[in-house]
Amino acid sequence: MPELPEVEIVKRGLDPVMRSQVINECEIFRSNLRYPFPPDFCEVLRGAKVESLCRRGKYLLIYLSNGYGLIWHLGMSGSVKIFPAKQSYPSFERVKHDHVVIHMQGGAVIVYHDPRRFGFMLLEKTENLNCIRPFSKMGPEPLGNAFNGDVLAELLQGRKSNIKAALLDQNVIAGIGNIYACEALYMARIDPARICTSLDKKEVESLARSVRQVLQKAIQAGGSSLKDYCHTDGNLGYFQHMFGVYNREGENCPDCDCDLSVTGGVQRIVQNGRSTFYCPRQQN
DNA sequence: CAAAGCTCCTGACCGC
DNA sequence: TGCGGTCAGGAGCTTT
């Protein structure tokens, strides 16, 4: 479940093997992931030099010298593996669910693996990238300079949904998924069921700070590895060991020492069809 | 327009 | 041991 921190870690892993390097060959092993590959997908990549890589929300954007940008989303279960030049000879073993293989001129091989195939790769002219969906409507980067309590207050202005759903809406803030929405609300000590408009200025300030902090800490920890996610070198992130509430139903949260037989510990509820984990004693 | 529901997919897990 | 049912969730689409 790659969210902003996991995509950022993937980007940092890809950068040294892709930036300023030429793509020698691209192979796809099925015609579609979530969406069909563009018909000229491999041709556009082949021979192109990678100018730069960036992350926008949960998206990876790879800018090519031929005027195209590769739009790459890891969906729910996507992961990227890099086989450095020395180890890629004679050839790596392609395993089940390896759908895309990119060969760099220096010999490194980049493999996209995605069992559930919620991920996708698309192409778009670089000049159009900011004008097309989802980027044209996407909310601000929570780790960017342009994000703070005032901005968040403006974004939540007049919203009638609960605050958890708002954090998950990519048109409000970019990059937050279910894990970090739960963790940010816990860190800010805000009940996930609160309606956006009911939050006062102080709470919104606290939430904006918590969003930034939880994402920064997760990046420092190499992201969260649950089920499918791992780094480009195969190592796991360890932020899942630092969860306060996510996936911890029935346990004490880090700031509670209450009697579990009385309080039941961290609760799991369903909001908008998604699990929410929270501590009723800390978040209200 | 906003908000909520539905859908895609596979593997893990559970109960019998 | 096997088998069917349920769950997980990002985001586009549909419905309200």
Image (tube, coloured by chain):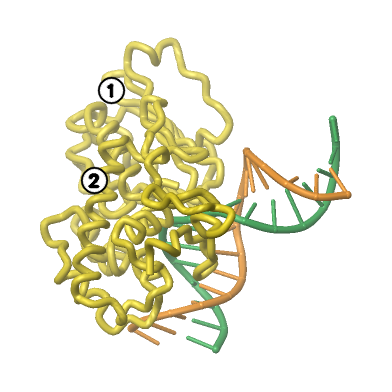
Chain colours: A yellow, B orange, C green
Q: Circle 2: is it few (<14), some (14-19), or many (20+) Cα within 10 Å?
A: some
> Number of callouts in the render?
2
Can I make out residue A39 in this image? no
- In percent of width and height, residue A213 lies at 23, 51
Residue where numbered disc 1 is placed: A105
Residue where numbered disc 2 is placed: A216
Relative to A181, is A64 above or below? above
Q: Secondary structure at mark 1?
A: loop
* Distance from Cα at disc 1 to Cα at disc 2: 33 Å
Task: Give the amino acid type for the residue marked by disc 2 in the picture.
Answer: Gln
Chain containing mark 1? A
The residue lying at 22 percent from left, 28 percent from top is A16
Is A47 displayed left or right of A119 in the figure? left
Q: Quadrant of residue C10?
A: bottom left
- In percent of width and height, residue A218 lies at 30, 43
- In percent of width and height, residue A29 lies at 52, 36
Is B6 displayed left or right of A244 in the figure? right
Chain containing mark 2? A
Q: Circle 1: is it few (<14), some (14-19), or many (20+) Cα within 10 Å?
A: some
Task: Give the amino acid type for the residue marked by disc 1 in the picture.
Answer: Gln
Q: Secondary structure at mark 2?
A: helix
The residue lying at 19 percent from left, 67 percent from top is A205
